[in-house]
Image: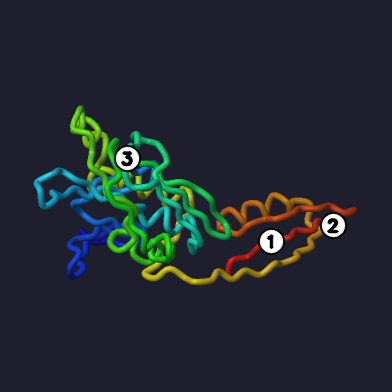
Amino acid sequence: MSDSLLELISIKDIGFYMIINHCTFPEGYLYDAENFSWVNRYTSNDNTAMVTIGATALLASLAGKLDSIKIKQVGTNIKKGKNLASLESAKFFGVLRSPLRGRIVEVNDSIINRPKIVNDFPYSEGWFAKLEPYPDNNEKDFEQLETIENCRAKMSSLIEQLRIRCFAASPDYEMFEIVHLVSDDPTADLEIMRWSEQNSQLLLETRREGNLFHFIIKKIK
């Protein structure tokens, strides 16, 4: 399957990825689409069922270059939907919610020391924590997660609604220019609002002085 919005590719040492609107999602993982998290199941050396949890490329792109990540401590018993970690950048503060109930057995210190790893490698080096899921009613928790094949419509909708732009490499900087527009067109306010929405530009201020409209726009280069 391949088109401009959706395709399947293979990346060495990682396996197959589905690409939706330029955002990647590994096959074989399970996803909590609404909470921007993924789960990868595996078995430890002592045959204990374990999971690795991380953030999808959508959260990494939405946040921008991450400056700070805090993760719950090893040994913490965490409930489904509760905060597993907090993430912060110059334009974003949010949390990663645990998609499963369980006990944290390992956290990724690398992303605490270098948060941008999550931006660059969200599905590999950028994992957040490893959990030992609770054995009681555990399969019900997994059943509420979805493969990328089953939730690709949700992912596509989120990308569109949140205007997320995924890139092959996460930029270190974002550049903007502030534009001051002046118009005497009586419908200018409606036109500029429509233009800013269609082109994903941020209208910071609208002011009318006599018969003139003044607009301050934060234009993404």
**Numbered disc in front, either 2 or 3:** 3
x, y percent for residue 82: 40, 37
| Residue 65 image position (x, y, % from top left) | 49, 64
Q: In the drawing, what numbered circle is on residue 212?
A: 2
Quadrant (top left, top right, bottom left, bottom right) of the N terminus: bottom left
Q: In terms of sequence position, does the residue under pointer 1 or pointer 2 come before the other?
A: 2
Q: To which residue does mark 1 refer? A: 217
Q: Residues within 10 Å of mark 2 (few under 14, many from 20)?
A: some
The mark closer to the camera, 1 or 3, is: 3
Q: Quadrant of residue 80?
A: top left
Local SS, label 1: strand
Q: Mark 3 — residue?
A: 99
The span from disc 1 to disc 3 (Cα, nearest Å) is: 39 Å
Q: Residue furthest right?
A: 210
Q: Where is residue 170 shown, x and y percent of the image?
A: 43, 68
Instruction: Give the residue type at disc 2.
Output: Leu
Which mark is in front, 1 or 2?
1
Q: Nearer the viewer, residue 106 or 57?
A: 106
At label 1, counting other C-alpha atoms closer than 10 Å, the crowd grade (few under 14, some 14-19, many 20 or more) is many
Label 3: few (<14), some or many (≥20) within 10 Å? many
